[in-house]
Amino acid sequence: MIGSVSVGQRFGMLLRASEMPHSVRNRLLVGFERFNSSAAGSRIHHIHLKNGRQQFYPAEKLGLGDINENVLEAKYAVRGTIPMRAEELQEQLHKNPGSLPFTSIVSANIGNPQQLKQKPLSFYRQVLSILQHPEILDQGRGELVAKGVFARDAIRRAERLLKDVGGSVGAYSSSQGVLGIRKTVAEFITRRDGGEPAYPEDIYLTAGASAAVSYLLSILCKGRETGVLIPIPQYPLYTASLALNNSHALPYYLDERSGWSTNTEEIESVVKEAVENGIRPAVLVVINPGNPTGAVLSVEAIEEIFTVAAKHGIVVIADEVYQENVFSGAEFHSMKKILRKLQKEHPGIYDNVQLASLHSTSKGVSGECGQRGGYMELVGFSREVRQVVLKLASISLCPVVTGQALVDLMVAPPRLGDESYETDRLERQTIHNELDRRASLLHEVFNSLEGIECQKPQGAMYLFPRLKLPYKAVQAAQHLEMTPDEFYCLSLLEATGICTVPGSGFGQEPGTYHLRTTFLASGVEWIKKWEAFHKSFYDQYRD
Amino acid sequence: MIGSVSVGQRFGMLLRASEMPHSVRNRLLVGFERFNSSAAGSRIHHIHLKNGRQQFYPAEKLGLGDINENVLEAKYAVRGTIPMRAEELQEQLHKNPGSLPFTSIVSANIGNPQQLKQKPLSFYRQVLSILQHPEILDQGRGELVAKGVFARDAIRRAERLLKDVGGSVGAYSSSQGVLGIRKTVAEFITRRDGGEPAYPEDIYLTAGASAAVSYLLSILCKGRETGVLIPIPQYPLYTASLALNNSHALPYYLDERSGWSTNTEEIESVVKEAVENGIRPAVLVVINPGNPTGAVLSVEAIEEIFTVAAKHGIVVIADEVYQENVFSGAEFHSMKKILRKLQKEHPGIYDNVQLASLHSTSKGVSGECGQRGGYMELVGFSREVRQVVLKLASISLCPVVTGQALVDLMVAPPRLGDESYETDRLERQTIHNELDRRASLLHEVFNSLEGIECQKPQGAMYLFPRLKLPYKAVQAAQHLEMTPDEFYCLSLLEATGICTVPGSGFGQEPGTYHLRTTFLASGVEWIKKWEAFHKSFYDQYRD
C-alpha cells in the first residue's frame, strides 16, 4: 500500500481499519479520549483518556449501504439521466461555445415556462413587489399609478394581502396558510364549480402541488400493506413518493388508442388483484388534465372513478394543476364538482368519498414555478384526519408566504372594471394562444413523421408521442445498456440540444416506447431541427 | 337507529355497512357499475353493471386507524396544545374583545420576529422587491436612487441575482439551488471560518433549515435499526422527523447546572448502550447556539463531539441557525472550522467525519421566517451520498427562488463603502441591542422570582427557565390530566395572553419542569404581567 499508512500500523495493531467490519470497529471503541495536542503534526498519535490512557482510530464512514433503501429506490426522471447530460452539455457550451452541433439547450424536459422566457403576468409581479417592500409606496401612490409603475388594483390587493398576513411576508403564517388567502381560494372554487360551496377550513396552502402529494402519501401510506393506484403513464413524482413511503404503486394503464382515457374495468381489476394479494388499495391518483398524456377526462370518466372510490373506500387524489391549460374543444371538469353532482343525484351513496384536489401556481398561464405556491382542498375527510395533515404541515412550519400570496392572485385575477383587467387579459390570451399554436404544430409535425404517432393534445403542457423504433435502434440501445426510448432521447439531445424525457420515466405499456416533451420553448426553429434529426435517425436505423 | 337508514336495508341485505369489516366489504365489491340516472332523487338505487346487473353500497371511510402510525406518532410542541389554545383565545378576542383579562396574545412560543413587529432589513427587501418586478427600474435608476427608494448597491445586487437565476425568480432553479448563490455562500463560510475553504458543490440551498433536517433524516434513517443522538432538551423538529422515519431518538442530556453544556461521557454511554441494544447510532445532532437552551458550545466541547463522531463513524448534523444570535461575552465557533482544525492537528484521524451544517434566513437579525430560505453545507460526504441528497431534493423540484436570493443577501450584506452599509449596520445593531436587552431583563426577572431558576442566556432567541412547581400545582395538573409544566403554561396563557411552550415538548430530565419563551415581543409590559401572574400562581399553590 504505497503512499498510505494503515491506521493499524500507526497504533501498532494488526488490522487495517478498512479490513475490519464496521461492527467490530465500533465495538473496539469505548470510553472518551482526547488527543494530546503535543502530537499535532506527527503521524503517530498518542491519545489520552481523561481517566487513563486509551487509543482509538477512526471508524468507517457511512456509505451508500447505510442509507435508507426507500430513498435509494426512488427515481425522478424529469430530473434524471437525460436532463443531467443536458446540464453537462450546457457547461460544455459555456466553456467551449463552438464544440457542439448546436448553440443552446432547449429544456423541453420540464414544465418550466419562465426558464424558456415566458413573461410573468404583470399584475402578479406588481403585487409581489409591493409585498416585499411596502415602503415603495411612500413615493406616493398617485405618482406611481400615473407613471404606470403600479396599477391601482395591484396596490389595493397588496394592501389587503399585507393585512391578511399580519403586516409582513417575512413572518411565519399559520401552517395551514393565511386565512384571508384560503377564503379567496374557497370563493374561487365555489365560482369554478357553479356555486357548489367550498370552505376555507378545507383549504391547505402548500409549497407547489408536490408538497401536497408528499403530505398526503406520507399520511395514507402505511408501508408494504398499502397500495396506491396510479395512472400509467404518470408524473414520476408519484412513484418517487411511493418509493419513499415504501408502499405499492398499483398501476392502471391509460388507453392510448382512445386518447389516453381511463378504463374503469382496468381500475376495478387492479383493485381486486391488490386485495387478493393482501394489499389495501388506499388511494387512487388521477391527473387531469393528464401529465404526461395531455388528456382531459370526461364527466363520465370522472363519475366512474368516484364509483370505484365509493365502493372500495379509496381516497382520491386529484392532481388538477393543469386545469387552466385546456385547449379549445376540450373542457375541464373539476373532480369536486362532479363529486357534488353525484352526491346530489344519489343521496348517501357517495358521501363516503374523500377527495384531495391539488392546484399550483407553477402551471396554467402563471408559470411561477420558482415561487412555490399551491393549495389542496380536502373534501370529505374527518376532522381527525385533517388535524393530522395540519400537524404534518406544521413540522415544515409554513409554506412560503409570497407563494401563498401568489395563490391569491392566481385564483382572483383582475376583474372587468379593474385597472389591470385589460392588460392582464391580453397577457393571458397571448400565452394561451402561443401554447395552443405550438402544441398543434408539434402534434402535426409528429404525425407527419415516420414511426411517430401522437394523440391530439387536449390540455396540460406536454405531448407524449409514441415512437415505433426500428429493430436496429433497439439493438443499438441494448448495446449501450439503455432503454430504446432513452437512446432516442439521448441521440436527440446530442444532435440538437433538445432535452426531453423518455417514456420509461413515466411508465408505458411493455413493448411500447414514448417520450415527453413540453411545447413551451418559443419559436419553431427547434421543431424543425427535431424533424431533421428524426429523419436522419430513421435513415440510420431503418430496418 | 332513528334518523338513519342503514345501507344494508336499502339493498335488502342483512348487514349494515358499519358492521362489516373493511376487508369483507371490499371482497363483496367486484365488477364495474353505473348508476341508472333515473334513480336520482330516490333513496333506493338500482345500480347497473355494463354486462349485467349488480349492486354496491359505499365502503367505510378511511379513518385514523388507516393512517401511517409514524405520522400519528410525530409531535411538534411549538405548534402544539398551548399555541392551539392561544389561537382559540385570539379568535375570542377578535369576536368579543372585552371577554378576556388581556387584549392581545403575546406569541412567545415561536421564534417569529416579524410577527412581533421586528422590521425586516431594508436592504433585503429592496433587492427582493426588484427581483419580483424588475420593470420597476424602468422608472429610471437615477431617480429611484435620488428619491431613496432603492440604494445603488441594492439595484446592483438585484441585477446580479437576476442574471444568476436566469432572468426570473419564477423559473425552477436547479434542485441544489442557484449556482451563483451557492458561490456567495461558499465565500461567506470561507470568510467566517478564517480562510478554511468551502465549495459551492457542497452547498445545498433549502426551504429553511427544516427542509434540510427532513432530507438528512430521510436518507440516514433506515427505520428501527437506526438511532439518532439528540440533545435533551431539543428542538422538537428532530423528534418529530425521527418519528416520521420510524427511527430511534437516542437522547443525550445537556447539563443544566453548567449552563446546558454537553457531556461527552454521557454521549459515549448513550452510543454504547445503543450498540448493545442492536441500534446503529448513525447521526448525532448538535444545536449550537442551543434551542431551547440558549447555550453556546466551547471549542473543547465541539472537539469532543467530533472525537465521538470519528470513533464511531457517526454523521454530525450541526443546526447552526442561531449563529448570528450570540450575546456579548459568548463566541460562536462553527463546527466546520473546528473540524478542519482537528483534521489539521491530527492528520488522518478525523478525515472520516461527515458533517452537515445548517443555516437559515429565519433567525439571526434577518428574521425572515415566512420567506423560507436556508442552506446546508455537506462536509466529507461521498459523491454517491451527495447524489442521493440531490435526488431527494429534486423530488420537491427546488427551494423557493426568492428564499434562495435571501440567503445570498444574508451571507453577503452590504460592505463598508456600499451605499446601504451604514443604514444596514444600524438596523442590525438596533435589533441585536433590543434582543440583548430583553434577554437580560427577562433573565433577571426570572431569577428574582420564587421557584424559577434560569441559566444565563448566551445565544439563540430563547430562555428555558426551570420551574420548581409546588406540590399543590403538580396535583392540580394531574387532576386536569396535564403535565405540571403544561399546567403552568396554560395558566399563564389564560391569565395574561402570553403563549409559551412547556418543557415537556422539548424533553427534560425526569422530575424537572421547564418552559421555553422567546424574548422577541417588544416592550417590557408583558414581562411585568408575567411577573405578577407568577406571584399569584405561587400564592395560590404554595405548599
Image: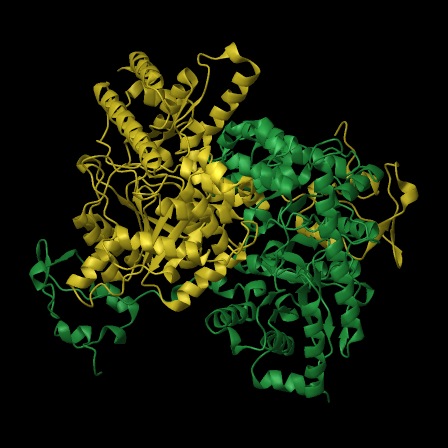
Chain colours: A green, B yellow
Residue at (56% x, 36% y) in the render: A177
Q: Is residue B66 left or right of residue B274?
A: right
Q: Is residue A410 left or right of residue A31?
A: right
Toward the right, the furthest residue is B38
Q: Is residue A519 left or right of residue A140?
A: right
Is A54 situated above or below B407? below
**Number of labelled discs?**
0
**In the rendering, at what x and y percent does residue A195 appear?**
78, 33
**In the rendering, at what x and y percent does residue A507 appear?**
66, 67
> Which quadrant is home to the C terminus of chain B?
top left
Is A433 situated above or below B106? below
Q: Is residue A522 left or right of residue B66?
A: right
Is B517 situated above or below A423? above
| Along the viewing direction, whichever of B521 and B69 lies nearer the viewer | B521
**In the rendering, at what x and y percent does residue B281 appear?**
32, 57
Which image quadrant is residue A2 in?
A: bottom left
